[in-house]
Amino acid sequence: MSRDWQKDMETVERFKYFQTLCHGIPMLVHGQTEAPEPVEVALEYWLQQYAAEERHNVKLCKQILETELREKKLREAIDKAIREYGLWHDEGSAANVMVEILHNAVTPLYPKEETKP
């Protein structure tokens, strides 16, 4: 079942407002010294927690997608470097070309701030 967080939160706010119209005074049971915490207080808290978790999950999903894209680009660069190696007869030249391919792939994926020790 899917819920509309905003609609639920508005319902809580309306309930809190109507409670003030009724003076919001809960009755105490014999022996109680304090009124129990109203249910809407807990409901409001959990709705806010849910909203925070949902925002966090969206952020994590974005990070996962970015990481998967980064991995794909790295795999493609590695494959290209390996194929390039086989095209050269001189291993030194092949190594230089491979390093250049890998450097060109890694540089935009990992800004200098991320690679500093």
Image (cartoon, grey):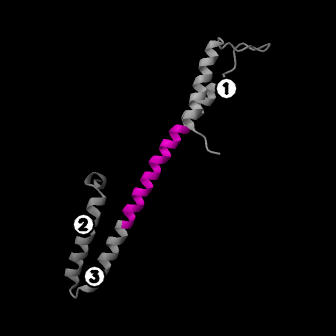
- Determine which residue is flagged by label 1: 39
Amino acid bearing label 1: Val
Q: Earlier in the sequence, mark 3 or mark 1?
A: 1
Give the residue at x 66% y 22%: 38
Residue 53, label in figure: none
Give the foreground label among 3 and 1: 1
Query: In the picture, residue 5 is in which quadrant?
Result: top right
Give the residue at x 43% y 57%: 65
Q: Earlier in the sequence, mark 2 or mark 1?
A: 1
Query: Magenta residues, as a range?
Result: 50-72
- Determine which residue is flagged by label 3: 85
The foreground one among 82 and 2 is 2
Q: What percent of the width, then of the height, locates residue 16?
A: 60, 21
Give the foreground label among 2 and 1: 1
Residue farthest toward the bottom in the current orientation of the protein: 89
Secondary structure found at label 2: helix
Q: Is residue 23 above or below residue 1?
A: above
User: Neighbour class for label 3 at 10 Å: few (<14), some, many (≥20)?
Assistant: some
Q: Is residue 23 above or below residue 61?
A: above
Amino acid bearing label 3: Tyr
Q: What percent of the width, then of the height, locates residue 81?
A: 29, 76
Please count the marks in the image. 3
Query: What's the CA distance linking mark 3 and mark 1?
Result: 68 Å
The foreground one among 60 and 17 is 17
Q: Is residue 62 magenta?
A: yes
User: Neighbour class for label 1 at 10 Å: few (<14), some, many (≥20)?
Assistant: few
Residue 104, label in figure: 2
Q: Earlier in the sequence, mark 3 or mark 2?
A: 3
Q: Is residue 63 magenta?
A: yes
Q: What percent of the width, then of the height, locates residue 21?
A: 62, 13
Amino acid bearing label 2: Asn
